[in-house]
Image: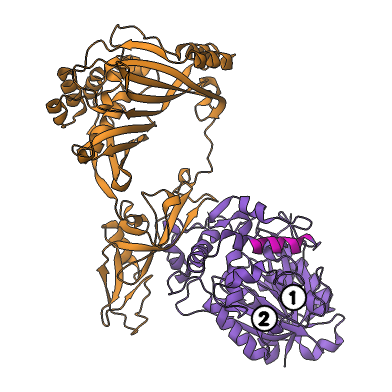
Amino acid sequence: MIEDLAEAARARGEVDGGTAPDPVNAPMVRHWLEAMGDPAAHYLDEGLAPPAMLQVWTMPGHGGGPRPSAVDTVLAGLDAHGFTGVVATDCTQAYDRPLRFGETPRAATAFTSLRGPKSTAMGRGYFLTWETTWYCGDERVGTMTFRVLKFDPATRPEPRPPEDGAQQPPPPPPPSTGDTAFFWDGAAAGELRIRRCADCGTLRHPPGPLCPACRSAAADHVVASGRGTVHSYTVHHHPPVPGRTAPFAVALVDLPEGVRVVGGVTGADPADVHVGMAVRADFARGGAEPPRWRPADQAVLPALELELTRTSITAQALATRDFTPVHHDPGRARAQGARDVFLNILTTQGLVQRYATTHRPGARVRRIAVRLGAPAHAGDTLVLTGTDRPREGRVEVRGTTALGRHVTATVDVVDVEDR
Amino acid sequence: MKAVIAGIGATEFSKDSGRSEARLAADAALDALADAGIAPEEVDGMATFTMDPTSEIALARAIGAGALRFFTRVPYGGGAACGAVAQAAMAVSSGAADTVLVYRAFNERSGRRYGRAVAQDGGTPTTLALELGWHVPAGLATPASWAALPARRYMHEHGATGEDFGRVAVQMRANAATNPRAWFHGRPITLEEHQASRWVAEPLRLLDCCQESDGGVALVVVGAARARSLPRPPAVIEAAAQGSGAGQLTMVDFYRDDIAALPEMAAVAERLWADSGLGPWDMDAAVLYDHFTPYVLMQLEALGYCKRGQAPALVADGRIGPGGDLPVNPHGGQLGEAYIHGMNGIAEAVRQIRGTAANQVPGAAHVLVTAGTGVPTSGLVLGAYS
């Protein structure tokens, strides 16, 4: 029955959702940049819309009424079968080119797939995917793949401990004695410290109480450059390891200082780790574990903390022309089980773009893919962190609140000279 | 005076023994003593692993042994296996004891599974806990992950592949398939099945890793002077050795120049050949510790069977199979028979010497046995009594 609706929706192909009520224009761009706190003035100078505004132009607005869509019949069918809950899980926007002031884009949706029923943490449900395409005239200017879970709230399972080691209690701090405490103090302070014999200067790791070369107990340490080369590694899959989500890589690294140090690998697909890989130490975990190893060409971006308020969330919802009550009306948000008003998806995309492009000034955004997690409410602090992977032309962004992960995103960029 | 292994005993090998580890130890001990024709009251010495949960005095009480004159434990996990026999032989040779029971028994599948991630606890750490403490917080928390780093480096240096590891597993499972005592009796595997088995810790797949077993094995060591009065042929301990390498750590031995080799096993081999007056190719069979397949390759090199990096070719040529010039683990090893921390391999070597093994190597007169790798280890050369 639901499958029949999905098949019929798919058979309709692209459904025209109509053109934007206004052409791309400076006031809306300025308003949007202000709401996002995005200092990128070059959009206004160049007469271009920020890419993450793509969907804003064709939002129905307040009182505009729903626009025709290929998805409506499937959503209604799922509601009728008890799958009344909905949560967006993924959204990927790809931008063929920037929209210019004066252009009036048109949107069309096509239903892509229905998968289910599946047992999820929210209950039994179906994943629906659809694709929206924006055109200026006949020219495609951007696309969006959107995935939601429609679930039956009555079937929500009791939480159970998953096989994921990251869900288990974290391991206790590393064991340490007077012979080794300097190393962990260094890790907490962002230094990779190597024990040095204070008499003959020989370095040793892992450090014992005496210098194996001259038997001296006198010792200090050097701070390693943090650079290194992978001597060997493993990608761990099974069994679960507390505090980790498999698969994860761990590397044994040769330091130019002449010793080896083991640490987890961060910022690299485990499949890309290899013997001989150039890495550098990353101390984000403090003293709870040895420094992790990150591909040498990556940069960790400074964190950005955003205090979310009802005003900021409401301003952003309106700047993205999203008048869904949960984004501006605390009473309606609470009635739906939320703690307070919370960020809408278009704003999450905008903040991700702001964060990524702040560190790549002038770079052109080609694609933003977000995976959505816990909501970010008024009163929360949203902390954005990220990694710049220039070789892949990609900035990875994570946003977390006290509730956990709000968003995991990748932003594909090309540098301005490549435009 | 030389020492001999007069009796061997074991429980069944299972995934859920249904009884206590002390009971497994006692069952294996009585089985070994019956095999040797020696009464429990005659036991006056004990040797086991530091990891064994059953104390010497608890086992002595359980089997009704008398007063003990000698007891010792050997550290470093499975590296202890042949070392416990070596210390029993020294006790017998020195007169410290006359009848030494060597035992190892655990519920390693239904109880504490060694394949799981280790948990580090608080308190003042031992030096061994400190060694692990450089690795467990980094995510190296399982034996397979510790074995994976030397294995990956071995591949890098010698061009070995996952199929080279797989051929070891295929041979062990083929041997186990015709050994009724083996857990994997009647269940051989193909190289394709090995290659399709899931990753555990790359480059190790599930079928590169030995099983987890419940069970116990015991051995009775006495002086050679008693050999003539024994009901069954004993195996003479022609040489026994323990060894560690320079700068060694246990299971996380990643800090010496060459991590894709086993210098501690080479040191053990040097002693074995010197003390026995025999060489690698004088062995009619070898029982090599096979908790992870890559270590079988590295052992063949450390023991002198081939040059560095050439073990994959030796295995691919079928030379470790039945009818090859070095049959390895005719019982199926720990990959195929059971994982009793190397002790079931010593029992297999005794059966080969006696001529009573399920997959008997015809006329086996000298058999090499090794203990755990990646740790300070040990080895034995056993021979026929004449």
Chain where mark 2 sits: B
Residue under the image location 17 percent in, 25 percent down: A34
Is B175 included in the stretch rendered in magenta? yes
Tell me the amino acid under the disc marked 1. Answer: Ala
Front in this rendered view, residue A12 or A115: A12
Question: Furthest-left residue in view?
Answer: A45
Q: Is residue B88 something that shows in the picture?
A: no
Give the prevailing secondary structure in the magenta stretch.
Answer: helix
Give the color scheme: rainbow, by chain, secondary structure or one colour: by chain
Tag 2, which secondary structure? strand
Image coordinates for residue A11, horizontal then vertical, percent: 51, 14
What color does chain B have in the rendering? purple
| Residue B60 in the image: above or below residue A230 | below
Residue B204 location in percent, x, y? 56, 58
Q: Which residue is mark 2?
A: B380
Segment colored magenta = B167-177
